[in-house]
Image (tube, helix red, strand yellow):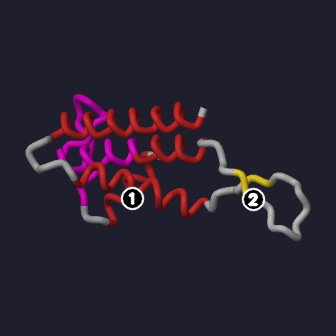
Amino acid sequence: MREAFEAWAQRDGHITRRREDKPDEYLVFETQRRWVIWQAALAHGKAAAAAPKAPVKPKDDAPAVQKTLQPDEASVRNRVLNEVLDAFSELDDSAGLDGIVKVIQSLKKKQKALAEDQS
C-alpha cells in the first residue's frame, strides 16, 4: 500500500523521503498529510465495500428469485473518494493533523451510524 502511495505522490511532485528518527513518517508535512488521507480513504473504502448490498426487485417477467446487487468496483471507489474528498474539503489550511484526525473520526462515526441503521 505504501509503495502505491509513494508512486502516486512522486508522480504528483511530492517528496517521499521519510524521517530518519521516525521511518513511518514523511519528512515533508504535506506528504505526511496526504499519506494519512490516503489511509483514511482506503479504510473508508473497505467499510463501504463490505456494506450489505441492496436487493434488486425482479421485473414482472423475471423469475421471483431474489437477487443482490454486486456493486461495480469503480462506482464504489468513486463514491468513497467523493465522500472522503468532501469531508476533507471542509478543512482549512491551519487545521493540521488534528483536523485530519477529526475528519477521520467523523467518517468512522458516519459509517458506524449507517451500519446501525441498516441492522
Q: Residue at x 47, y 58 (%)?
A: 79
Compared with 41, 105 (above or below) is above
> Where is residue 52 drawn, in percent x and y?
64, 43
Between discs 1 and 2, the one toward the N terminus: 2
Q: Which residues are magenta?
A: 14-40
Q: Position of residue 23 (x, y in %)?
A: 30, 34
Query: Between tags 1 and 2, which lies in front?
Result: 2
- The residue at the point 36 percent across, 51 percent down is 84
**What label does residue 50 carry, if any?**
none
Give the x, y percent position of residue 90.
21, 51
Position of the C terminus by quadrant: top right
Q: From the viewer's perspective, tell me whether residue 62 is left or right of residue 11.
A: right
Relative placement, left or right, of 29 versus 1 is left
Residue 39, horizontal then vertical, whole percent:
40, 43
Residue 38 is inside the magenta segment: yes
Q: Quadrant of residue 101?
A: top left
Is 104 placed above or below 15 here? above
Q: Which residue is mark 1?
A: 82
Q: Residue at x 13, y 49 (%)?
A: 92
**Helix, strand or loop for disc 2:** loop
Residue 36 vs residue 92, the one in the foreground = 92
Measured Cα–Cα span from mark 1 to mark 2: 27 Å
User: What type is the residue that disc 2 sits on?
Assistant: Lys
* 1 and 2 marks in contact (CB < 8 Å): no
Amino acid type at image mark 1: Asn
Kindly state the secondary structure of the residue where label 1 is placed: helix
- Answer with the quarter of the image where residue 46 lies: top right
Magenta-span inclusion, residue 102: no
**Residue on which the image places disc 2:** 57
